[in-house]
Image (spheres, rainbow, N blue to C red):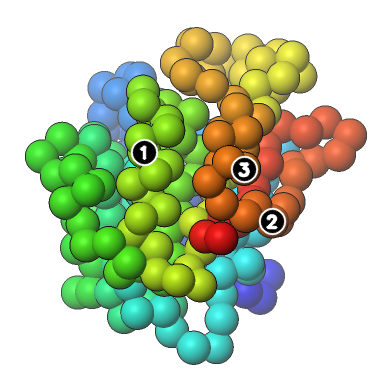
Amino acid sequence: MKTTDFNSYKTRYRNIIQQVLVQTEIGRLDEAAFPAYSHRNSIINWLFWQRLRKVMEHVQCPTPYEHVLDFGCGSGVMLPFLSQISSQVTAMDIDLLPLERVRTYIPLASNVDVKDATKNKISDLPENSFDLIIALDVLEHVKDLQRTLNELLALLKQGGQLIVSGPTENILYRIGRIMAGPEYSGAYHERGIAEIKKELIQLARIEHIATLYWPVPLFEIFTVKKY
């Protein structure tokens, strides 16, 4: 993705998120990362958007995907991009309010299907049907990690990939959360990316995409492929 294209994408979405935050109860959209994507601190804001850019650059390919799953879609920040690179996109989350608020400003493309994860299970989706699954900063929140990982991997076609990103939860990351503001200081993560990776290594092949950023590793991104 060209820098100009990414910056345009970022600016459009950032402006919408700021508008939605003004109209919403304080704290209601924190877990969907609204404060981070619109943070006044340029370093914090850049870091969160850089995660998305790394993922976009990794998954972009000349041939469109047939079916993509955005697991834990949150505000839907990746959906406009995914709808352009795939024939069909499924978005799933347990809290769809963030997406509903954003889609009043940025309507979803016709090839995007939204599923409420409180009513639809991962196992309800057809196995071996997705070329690409993204799970960005969501697996640290799930209760039953092993079951969730097994169910997500079962959805992948042979040759498909699961893209995972998550916080390191190291001391530097925790200090950074506190410094970023009160909306980041709560202990609401079940685990860090190291534990997620440890579980996945037993199930599939992992390839590193990026660590953001040396010498202060706050987030890690990697791709997972079936054996």
Task: Say which label, 3 or 2, has the lower sequence index.
Answer: 3
Q: Residue 143, percent across and down?
A: 36, 23
The residue that mark 2 highlights is: 207
For label 3, the residue is 201
- Residue, far bottom: 63
Looking at the image, which residue is at 36% across and 38% down?
148
Which structural element holds mark 1?
helix
- The answer to whether residue 224 shows anywhere in this view is yes
Local packing at callout 2 (Cα closer than 10 Å; few below 14, some 14-19, many 20+) is few
Marks 3 and 2, how far apart at CA: 10 Å
State which quarter of the image contains the C terminus.
bottom right
Q: Residue at x 24, y 35 (%)?
A: 95
Residue at 71% in and 32% down: 218
Residue positioned 19% across, 43% down in the render: 121
Camera-side mark, 1 or 3: 3
Q: Is residue 156 above or below residue 163?
A: below
Q: Position of residue 197 (x, y in %)?
A: 61, 37
Q: Label 1: few (<14), some or many (≥20) within 10 Å?
A: some
